[in-house]
Image (cartoon, rainbow, N blue to C red):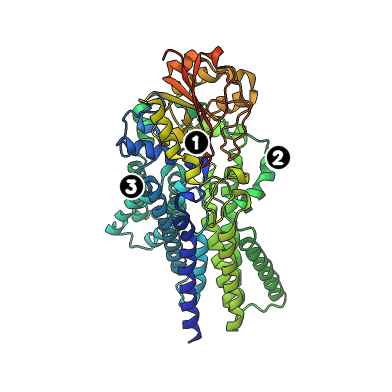
């Protein structure tokens, strides 16, 4: 009877926490705070621009931004998120996908853990661990990508046990999995791990598992279909890209090794583990206690079934942590210049690709380890009341994830997944895009599709609002465009070595850089007048006509720009000065 009551309580808790998690974004709507980096400064605006122009599913069609850049370079793959954009407006799509993220995260981890520990006695622990996993923060466009990884682990374990005499029809369902995922962030890494798993199974069983091989081929085919833009650019267009000259920030070996422990515990910006307060301490304390217990039993030569089970736990935990350490070392090794160069030389296809992101898989391994630890502790508790402490630990982790802010500025009560930002830089959707405000500017200047650039704020704001922005943030695009835009900002790059280094090592942010006016938006409006250093001829050559600036530009006469008007609104974070190339 008590177990039934406990199970009902856990079920109710799971539902209530999920409702609490999604309530703020529905309650606040566009007044909720969203992450800016790799979200509102790029993908949201891309999706809006592509959808407004009927190009959301277009493979290789000219757009009206960045010099009519092809839709192939806007890396919105054909997965579930893009189809949400197709069905709903951009903001509603995010609301829907936020719910999908939690449901997929919970369901995929629950299915995997239930397969590993089918005993009903452990169901409540599995539900609580699955819930904490489902609530983990990540970059919005990658929500479902990371949360669905346990589902693929489950598929591998299931297929591995199938009859190898023939190919099972069910394996063809794997071609659908990439619809939840993406090749660049997840697909490459899971395909490598799947291949290693096939090799290990082959060595152990001394025969190839046809279903696993078929599954690998189907996954690869699915990722090609879902990320068709990526493969089209690489193998069909074959255009030299800015990533071909990409230089990731490099560190000496000693500094790399010192970074391993931090990344092992915390994770990375895109995929924080949120394990440092509850999960990792619980695992470490349990592991040390069990090792001491086993040594004590071994000394007394009193090794029963319990000792055997605990030895299996210890070996399993060492294996799991070894896997996470390898993933973390791969991430750190990618930052070492000579290793990165060596990999790019031996495997040219990986040049410019961040192959160190195996660390993204760590969070899945961490929560499997957490479940294993709690289940092992629960099995040791002969008294039912003591097991309540195990449930309390799981609930504490759920609370930690819900209120987690740390270095990622995230809680479920402000919905911000950005890196550390000042309070005046944590902006709502409405504040960042200020749709009505920019619509008024468009009407007032009689805008007819001319090229526009932003100074002192993200160009994605203009792109989202229907302007033909000539600048922007895009990860991978034609090298010729990067070099053309470099001509525009060359005077500024010559003055500021930091801007020059940042642009020339990648050029992902084609921005009008300025020493006195940062592009990061803020609610603070008091901006002093600034001097703009650009090559106006190059600006016009790439289609530039207007500049929208957060501050007054003092050298417009020298540059050859006419001041059009200043636009202010007490309800908007922007004060915008509009300038137009003279005689344009």
Q: Is residue 388 above or below residue 127?
A: below
Q: Is residue 496 above or below residue 213?
A: above
Marks 1 and 3: which is nearer the front? 3
Kindly identify the residue that appears in the image at 31 percent across and 36 percent down. 55
Determine crowd level at label 3: few under 14, some 14-19, many 20+ residues with C-alpha closer than 10 A: some
Q: Position of residue 133 (x, y in %)?
A: 51, 60
Q: Position of residue 383 (x, y in %)?
A: 60, 84
Determine crowd level at label 2: few under 14, some 14-19, many 20+ residues with C-alpha closer than 10 A: few
Q: Is residue 70 above or below residue 307?
A: above
| Mark sitting earlier along the chain (1/2) | 2
| Mark sitting earlier along the chain (1/3) | 3
Q: Which mark is residue 177?
A: none
Element on which disc 2 rests: helix
Mark 2, residue position: 254
How far separated are the C-alphas under marks 2 and 3? 45 Å
How far separated are the C-alphas under marks 1 and 2? 23 Å
Q: Which mark is residue 353?
A: 1
Determine crowd level at label 1: few under 14, some 14-19, many 20+ residues with C-alpha closer than 10 A: some
How far separated are the C-alphas under marks 1 and 3? 26 Å
């Amino acid at each position: 009877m008590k177990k039934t009551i406990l199970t009902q309580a856990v079920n109710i808790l799971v539902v209530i926490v999920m409702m609490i998690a999604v309530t703020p974004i529905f309650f606040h709507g566009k007044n909720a705070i969203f992450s800016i980096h790799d979200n509102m400064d790029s993908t949201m605006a891309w999706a809006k621009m592509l959808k407004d122009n009927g190009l959301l599913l277009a493979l290789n069609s000219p757009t009206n931004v960045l010099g009519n850049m092809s839709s192939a370079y806007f890396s919105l793959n054909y997965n579930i998120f893009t189809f949400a954009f197709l069905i709903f407006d951009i903001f509603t799509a995010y609301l829907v996908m936020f719910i999908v993220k939690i449901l997929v995260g919970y369901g995929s981890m629950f299915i995997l853990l239930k397969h590993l520990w089918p005993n009903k006695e452990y169901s409540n622990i599995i539900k609580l661990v699955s819930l904490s996993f489902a609530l983990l923060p990540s970059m919005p466009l990658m929500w479902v990508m990371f949360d669905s990884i346990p589902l693929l682990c489950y598929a591998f374990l299931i297929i591995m046990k199938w009859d190898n005499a023939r190919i099972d029809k069910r394996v063809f369902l794997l071609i659908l999995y990439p619809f939840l995922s993406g090749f660049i962030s997840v697909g490459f890494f899971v395909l490598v791990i799947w291949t290693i798993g096939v090799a290990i199974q082959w060595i152990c069983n001394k025969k190839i598992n046809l279903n696993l091989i078929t599954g690998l081929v189907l996954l690869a085919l699915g990722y090609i279909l879902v990320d068709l833009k990526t493969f089209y650019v690489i193998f069909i267009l074959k255009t030299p890209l800015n990533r071909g000259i990409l230089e990731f920030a490099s560190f000496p070996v000693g500094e790399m090794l010192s970074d391993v422990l931090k990344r092992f515990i915390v994770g990375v910006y895109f995929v924080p583990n949120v394990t440092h307060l509850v999960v990792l301490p619980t695992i470490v304390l349990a592991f040390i206690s069990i090792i001491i217990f086993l040594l004590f039993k071994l000394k007394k030569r009193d090794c029963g079934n319990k000792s055997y089970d605990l030895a299996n736990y210890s070996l399993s935990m060492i294996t799991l942590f070894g896997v996470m350490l390898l993933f973390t070392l791969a991430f750190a090794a990618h930052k070492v210049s000579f290793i990165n160069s060596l990999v790019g030389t031996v495997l040219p296809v990986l040049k410019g690709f961040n192959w160190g992101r195996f660390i993204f898989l760590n969070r899945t391994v961490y929560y499997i380890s957490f479940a294993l630890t709690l289940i092992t502790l629960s099995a040791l508790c002969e008294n039912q009341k003591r097991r309540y402490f195990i449930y309390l630990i799981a609930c504490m982790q759920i609370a930690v994830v819900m209120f987690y802010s740390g270095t990622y500025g995230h809680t479920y009560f402000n919905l911000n997944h950005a890196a550390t930002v000042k309070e005046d830089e944590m902006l709502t959707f409405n504040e960042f895009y200020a749709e009505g405000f920019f619509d008024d500017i468009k009407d007032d200047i009689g805008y007819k599709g001319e090229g526009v650039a932003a100074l002192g704020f993200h160009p994605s704001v203009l792109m989202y609002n229907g302007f033909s922005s000539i600048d922007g943030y895009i990860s991978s695009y034609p090298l010729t465009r990067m070099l053309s835009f470099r001509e525009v900002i060359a005077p500024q790059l010559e003055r500021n070595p930091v801007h020059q280094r940042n642009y020339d090592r990648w050029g992902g942010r084609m921005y009008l850089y300025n020493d006195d006016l940062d592009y990061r938006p803020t609610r603070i409006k008091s901006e002093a007048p600034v001097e703009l250093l650009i090559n106006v001829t190059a600006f016009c050559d790439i289609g530039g006509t207007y500049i929208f600036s957060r501050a007054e530009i003092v050298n417009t006469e020298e540059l050859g720009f006419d001041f059009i008007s200043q636009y202010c609104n007490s309800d908007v974070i922007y004060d915008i000065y509009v300038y137009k190339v003279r005689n344009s």
